[in-house]
Amino acid sequence: MFFRNTVKTVAVSVALLAFGAQAKTFQYELQVLGSHGGEIQYPGLDLEDASSVTLTVDQEDQWSPAILTSLEINFSNAPSLSVSNFQVDDGGWRHEATVDGAWVYRQLDVVVDGLDLESLNNTMINIEGYVSEAENFIGAERSLNYDQRLFTVHGELVDATPSKIVDVASFTVDGKQVELSLRDNPALDPNSNNGDMAFVVELLWFGEGKEVYHFHAPFGDESKFYEAYKLEVTTTTGPDGDETAISVKIKDAQGMEFETHHVYLEDMLREAYEF
């Protein structure tokens, strides 16, 4: 039986501050997803139910502005819609793009409202699609006609950037194997109400199930430019026998290394599995 995910946080101490430039691509998905069709309804084209939304954001480094490069909306009863080449308006909070040859339409206008590229996690956004009324493809001045709306989609952005396992450590506790798997990219810290990020260690304790342990990343939104790469294991002899401590090694874009505070394996298991 798998237990529900329990998350605990450990503070990270910075061993060395050095930031390097490295372009990265981030993916975000919409949760608490809602959608409905618009004023225009073409027979046989059902845009009422959006099943998933993925936004791709590129950022050269932590000092450069983030750029919305693509948007994909999947519908339960219609082909997906892919959008790119966004233009920014309304002080950076509105992103607009035109899609040629979508579904049965020559041209669509797609608008993303409420997208704060400086603070994406937990942001509520609204996406709408309209039949374009531009008379030509080049140099046409556009205005949105709300009577020509095809769909509306809204929800909360959550970081869904793919990550991979970069290190694994195994132990035996109470006669059962415990496996710790470290992921490279930080993820949204479920213990935070401020959109903080954390480095992720997945736990598999045979006979007890799976849990997740989060090491808090203290670099703010810049944490997404750091990568975890190693589980550091230290064993010392204490009054009650050997004690195993775990920490996570991290590096920035220039390869400068950092290390978290250590956490005793026994404490990690006690907190994660709530015993």
Image: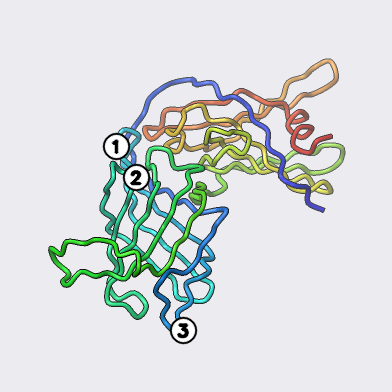
What residue is disc 3 on? 44
Instruction: Tell me how far mark 3 sits from mark 2, CA to CA.
Output: 34 Å
**Which amino acid, mark 1?**
Ser
Say which quadrant the C terminus sits in. top right
Q: Is residue 248 above or below residue 105?
A: above
User: Which badge, 1 or 2, is on the more N-terminal residue?
Assistant: 1
Q: Residue at x 14, y 66 (%)?
A: 138
| Secondary-structure class at tag 1 | loop
193, 171: nearer the viewer: 193
116, 208: nearer the viewer: 116
Decide: marks 3, 1 in contact (CB < 8 A)? Answer: no
| Secondary-structure class at tag 3 | loop
Q: How is the image coloured?
A: rainbow
What residue is disc 2 on? 93
**Which amino acid, mark 3?**
Gly
**Looking at the picture, how far across and down is residue 192, in whole percent?**
59, 33
Q: Residue 272, located in which quarter of the rendered image? A: top right
- Is 70 on the left or on the right of 158, as rendered? left
- Is 72 on the left or on the right of 1, as rendered? left
Q: Residue at x 63, y 34 (%)?
A: 191
Q: Residue at x 37, y 54 (%)?
A: 112
- How would you rate the neighbour count of disc 1 (Cα within 10 Å): few for under 14, some for 14-19, many for 20 or more? few
